[in-house]
Amino acid sequence: MTLPQPRVAVIGAGPSGLYAAAALLAAGYGDAGISVDVLDRLPAPYGLVRYGVAPDHVKMKSVIRVLQKPFDPAEVHFLGNVAVGRDGGGAPGVPLEVLREHYTAIVHATGSSVDRALGIPGEELAGSIGSGAFVSWYCGHPDFTELDPPLAHPGVAVVGAGNVALDVARVLAKSHEEMAGTDIPDRVLDALTRSGIRDVHVFVRRGPQHVRFTPAELRQIGELANAEVVVHDDGLLAAGIEAPEDRRQRQNLEMLTRWAAAGGSEGGTKPRRIHLRFLRSPVRLLGEHGRVSGVVVERNRIDADGRVVGTGEEETLDVGLVVRAIGYSAEPVPGLPFDERSGTVPNVGGRVVRDGEPVPGAYVTGWIKRGPTGVIGTNKGDAAETVAALLEDLPHLPAPAHPDRESLLEALAAYGVHPVDWTDWLRLDAEELRLGAARGAERVKVAELAAMLAACRAEAEVS
Ligand code: NAP
């Protein structure tokens, strides 16, 4: 029996979506395979690899070579600049119901883009920023070009003990020379170069044995040209902490113990310091003229059940910027169920479920499926699970009402959505490489949406 060619849309061109697209292609379904479109609300692909991986983590970004493979022989179609279900960053959006008329199945891979809040007084002050926004700013995300974080004050607080907290602390502490060779936009490089920051305080609510850093990331902050690490642990490390079972936590503990014993990482004369302050939680932010001027932190203890308990002992530090790096939540997708508690779309193995019943043709992968955990590679296995579920369902899913590309483009145009394709993206890519060559960097990002679109369409308009 000849199976009709199914059409699948993957929404989100980040690592989770692109691993799903590759798995769909590799599935060898039917005679003609599966037709796969990858949609993204931005004109550029790669999601968190482009806008979340720290700019100085160049090696990590090389995964792009793997992620782009299905586009190069044009087996998968890129539809950038397509916001789905909402008005994304000023761009018009196409409702999900409309897309459903054009695809057999839809895989949602839009990640977790909402910063979790601390829920403390003063959090709304200017200069109190979630790590999602802050990281997006320095990575040149078009939604955050106007963020203008206050960098003049010598003190900064970073809240959290995950890799994102370390990324933020490291980028703030690095020298101009260390950042100039990365892909950050010129405007971000200028702001970081002019920064008056001297002390980056990282607040960890639990002890040195509980941090969630990967050891390689922790090691990096001890090797900066411009900054040393100072450990504030109330003498816990010198007194000795039982080695954790987890290998990574043990390695972190060994490193922190060495730094604490040495009075810090090497280089006591460097102009900046990254302070790791354990057992401390911010309890309120202080403000002057509506802007952050300080942070009050409470000392914690860990009770017999491993819970964090405040001791009532408080101290105040002068800071002009507070970045909370305490995790993310997904943005609900209009038309799909959403679990507010976990910040994910309810699913079983990638099949979206509403009230325990699968929603036909709807799938999730990546952070929107499992929450904001794991490294880029984690998404590969995650996508494989989702695609396996989709393939199992495909023979039972009805064909879309409008299976052809022309009617899709017409429908998008009716909502004011004019996609860019892979060739358009390659023009923007070339422009970024050109800007990079001029600064002695591999690439310099174009951050403004209008400029991104202009670069995408430049030659198309000339020819
Ligand atoms: P994360 O690893 O989950 O860390 C979140 C941190 O926030 C934890 O230390 C947590 O402390 C703390 N926290 C949560 N609520 C808090 C509160 N109310 N007050 C104070 N602290 C609070 O999340 P992430 O750093 O956002 O990273 C997300 C994922 O991306 C992780 O899997 C991470 O490894 C990955 N990532 C990897 C890299 C890399 O490989 N280079 C870089 C960036 C991100 P508790 O432990 O006490 O809960």
Image (cartoon, rainbow, N blue to C red):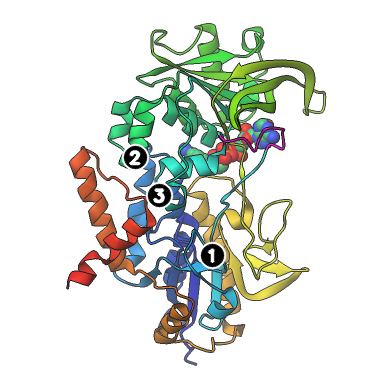
Q: Name the residue under label 1.
A: 87
**Mark 1 vs mark 3, CA separation in Å:** 22 Å
Residue occupying image coordinates x 39% and y 85%: 406
Q: Is residue 124 shown in magenta?
A: yes
Residue occupying image coordinates x 33% and y 43%: 185
Residue range of the region highlighted in magenta in the rendering: 118-126
Image height check: is 412 above or below 126? below
- The amino acid type of the residue labelled 3 equals Arg
For the residues bearing labels 1 and 2, Cβ distance under 8 angstroms:
no
Crowd class of label 2 (few under 14; some 14 to 19; many from 20; radius 10 Å): some
The CB of the residue at mark 3 lies under 8 Å from ligand 1: no
Q: Is residue 430 shown in magenta?
A: no
Predominant secondary structure in magenta? loop
Give the structural element (helix, strand or loop) at label 1: loop
96 sits left or right of 404 in the view? right
Q: Residue 50 carries which label?
A: 3
Give the structural element (helix, strand or loop) at label 2: helix
The first of marks 1 and 3 along the sequence is 3
Q: Which mark is residue 187?
A: 2
Label 2 or label 3, whichever lies nearer to me, is 2
* Ligand 1 lies in quarter: top right
Image height check: is 88 above or below 218? below
Residue occupying image coordinates x 54% and y 32%: 165
Residue 363: percent from the left, percent from the top?
60, 68
**Mark 2 vs mark 3, CA separation in Å:** 17 Å
Image height check: is 23 above or below 215? below
- The amino acid type of the residue labelled 1 equals Asp
- The amino acid type of the residue labelled 2 equals Arg
The first of marks 2 and 3 along the sequence is 3
